[in-house]
Image: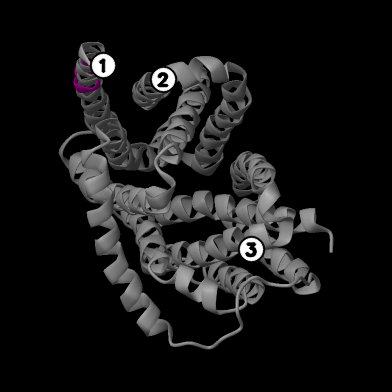
Amino acid sequence: MNRKLFLYVKAFSDFGNFMDMIVLNVLIYAATGSPVYLAAAMAARTFGGVLSSLFSGVVADRYNRRYIMIITNVLRALIILILIPFPNPTLIIVVSFLIGFTNTFFAVSFSSEVPTIFGEDKILQTNALVARLTSISLVAGFIGAALITDFLGYKITLLIDASTYLISALVLLKMNWETGSANRVIAVASGVKEKVISIFHDIKEVYKYLTVAPMLMMVNVVFLVGAFAGSSHNLGIPLLAEMIHVERQGFFYGMIWAVWGLGSVFATMILPRIKPFIEKQLYWVCFGSAILMSTGFIIFLSTTMVWIIFPFAFFTGIFDAAFTTLHATILQKSENHIRGRIFGVGMLLKSLGFALGFLVAPILLEKTSMPAMVWILHGALILTTCVIILVASNYKTKQKLLTKAS
């Protein structure tokens, strides 16, 4: 088996995933003209992912993961194709939920099989290649969705989108490997119950750990508020695209995200080159990246001038990727016995913060304007980060004094 082909299958599925992110949001906004419906579609996708995350791991551990990936790819294709004859708003929200639901199943099964296929000793190199291919898929998917929707219409975009999932499924069908999951049919319901109970235990254990690791606690607070603020630009960018050119909304929507994606790719190239500096100032670079990321979003979402939007979208992509990467790096420095739970609870809080943002953002839109909504939510992140920096500086100073005294 060509093992790298397995990674390209994932990249191809990601390409389809990023395409439908654009086309579904454009479709529901074109059908309703309502930011509330747009937010509902985005929130539905998030909730679908949160719900499936409760038991996708249980399923991946107890069934053949290759079959799970094949089935979810086929299901994603069929779900997308439903919208071609029936593009009504309610169905788009349902489809968004189902796409979020099935995406998580595919992602969990894929990630679980990487060590089995490539070996435990090559996980780091493999994950680096996966990240690079994901970034390329992101840029290509957003540009593809923008150009195809603009020139050929949303139906062709949906057809191509569905075909990427089907091709991915066909390739997986032709591939064969010794799967790491057991082919046992065990009641999933009990696994789900265990998972829900374990989440509460994990949160309790993580909280205990964070009380003795205050810097990690502070980084997670910034990350949580960052997820909350993220709803504003996810909702704001399609609205900005319409303000730039109402008839070419899909094109500008995709291109803004594509330029942002290029900034993210650039960040992944720069960060390793300044590793010594980052290691010395890890927390402060992470906090600074959060502030610069939010500043970038505020600037380019406050204007309709393309010559400002694209450069600052690129700038924002750099610091968005830096913040996310450095946050993960800080979490990875936690002790091994609790590291998995730190990440698990962090992802749960991120999803909940994101979902809460999609409840608050439409209310702010009705009361104010799109730029004001972005200012308020990303301003909250900047303010929170500044407070955290002051608290962290005070903590570090006290630690140094205690060290000298001892």
For the residues labelled 2 and 1, the Cα–Cα distance comes to: 24 Å
Circle 1 sits in a helix, a strand or a loop, which is it?
helix
Q: Is residue 110 visible?
A: yes
Which percent across, then down, holds residue 369? 24, 33
Q: Which mark is residue 403?
A: 1
For the residues labelled 3 and 2, the Cα–Cα distance comes to: 33 Å
At label 1, the amino acid type is: Thr
Crowd class of label 2 (few under 14; some 14 to 19; many from 20; radius 10 Å): some
Q: Nearer the viewer, mark 2 or mark 1?
A: 1
Which percent across, then down, holds residue 89? 38, 64
Point out the tag, 1 or 3, that comes first from the N-terminus.
3
Q: Which residues are magenta?
A: 390-394
Which percent across, then down, holds residue 350? 34, 47
For the residues labelled 1 and 3, the Cα–Cα distance comes to: 45 Å
The residue carrying mark 3 is: 113
Q: Which mark is residue 154?
A: none
Picture residue at 68% right of the left edge, 63% below the top: 116
Circle 3 sits in a helix, a strand or a loop, which is it?
helix
Q: Residue furthest right?
A: 1
What's the magenta bit mostly, secondary-structure-wise?
helix
Magenta segment: does it hold 118? no
Point out the tag, 2 or 1, that comes first from the N-terminus.
2
Picture residue at 30% right of the left edge, 38% below the top: 220
The front one of 113 and 297 is 113
At label 3, the amino acid type is: Glu
The residue carrying mark 2 is: 285
